[in-house]
Image (cartoon, helix red, strand yellow):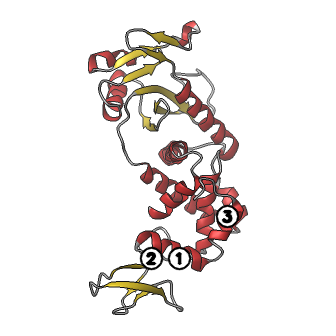
Amino acid sequence: MASKLTVRQFFQRFPSDEACLEHVMKVRFGLRHECAKCGKDATFHKLASRPAYSCSQCGAHVYPCAGTILQDTRTPLQSWFYAIYLFVATRHGVSGRELERVLGVTYKTAWRMAKQIRTLMSQVNGFEILQGHVELDEAYVGGKRSGKRGRGAEGKTIVMGLKERDGRIAVEVIPNIKKATLREVVLRNVEPGSIVSTDELMSYGLLEGDGYRHGAVKHGAKEWSYYDYRHDATHHTNNVESFWRLFKKSVASTHIHISAKYMDRYLGEFVFRSNHRHQENAMFDLLVAAL
């Protein structure tokens, strides 16, 4: 199957609520599997009167959407699927107002759907320790507040990014940029012995003592990259900074402002999209499987 999923391809795959329900059934249980009630290998057929499938051996019913965010929903399944498609197909994310307009639902419904899809994305991200060459950088995200800019700015949420070179990214909301805070995040997310690139923030000076091969670029001195002969590595933080630039631009253009309360969900959405970029079909199926 092609990695890209166009609007036309989406509606060819899911022309109706029935097609969406069948896809959920296939992903979660399979149209043929061992029946939980009679224990026999059986085929399952859609019931005409309800969103359920019946065992060909004993007649037991399976409700594909039970226990998922689709259970008891009054929003058509095709609308849910199209909302998920929009989340995986767009680069800058989808706002509640956008879903309200495209799906023809109330803003309250659109906001709830977006919240649940972002939670799915965060859950699918899972955890896998980063290794090899990892870049670290923090960013300050939030509404505008007069006063100091950059590190130390008030009224903003501090987020930390850890990006494998040519690999995955992990992000966390952190309370501060103290040495103990950054050290705990790195030890938990990065394999000891990895090469780690940071800027000159003093809190990162601890990394050599923890077994990491650490190099710091001095942005204050207009140094953006340098080659480290000790570790045979080029140190810079360009990749993780690019992620933060895209995230901030997306927030400004799509959401305007994100509260600290929901920051982790929006970060999870962008991490999911970054870690699976150019794989829209795979992203879509991963989210449906996680329902």
Q: Are marks 3 and 1 in contact (CB under 8 Å)?
A: no
Q: Pointer 1: what residue?
A: 21
Using a 10 Å C-alpha cutoff, classify the residue at mark 1 as few (fewer than 14 neighbours), some (14 to 19) or many (20 or more). Answer: many
57 vs 98: above or below: below
Q: Pointer 2: what residue?
A: 64
Q: Are marks 2 and 3 in contact (CB under 8 Å)?
A: no
Task: Give the residue type at disc 3.
Answer: Gln
Question: Helix, strand or loop at disc 2?
Answer: loop
Earlier sequence position, callout 3 versus callout 1? 3
* Residue 181 place in picture, x, y as percent: 35, 28
Q: Work out which quarter of the rendered image holds the N terminus and state it.
A: bottom right
Task: Give the residue type at disc 1.
Answer: Leu
Task: Give the residue type at disc 2.
Answer: Pro
In terms of depth relative to the viewer, which is nearer, 211 or 114? 211
289 vs 273: above or below: below
Residue 248 visible to the viewer: yes
* Residue 285 place in picture, x, y as percent: 51, 61
Earlier sequence position, callout 2 versus callout 3? 3
Residue 186 lies in quadrant: top left
Q: Pointer 3: what residue?
A: 9
In terms of depth relative to the viewer, which is nearer, 147 or 260? 260
Give the distance between the C-alpha atoms of the residues marked 3 and 1, in whole angstroms: 17 Å
204 vs 223: above or below: below
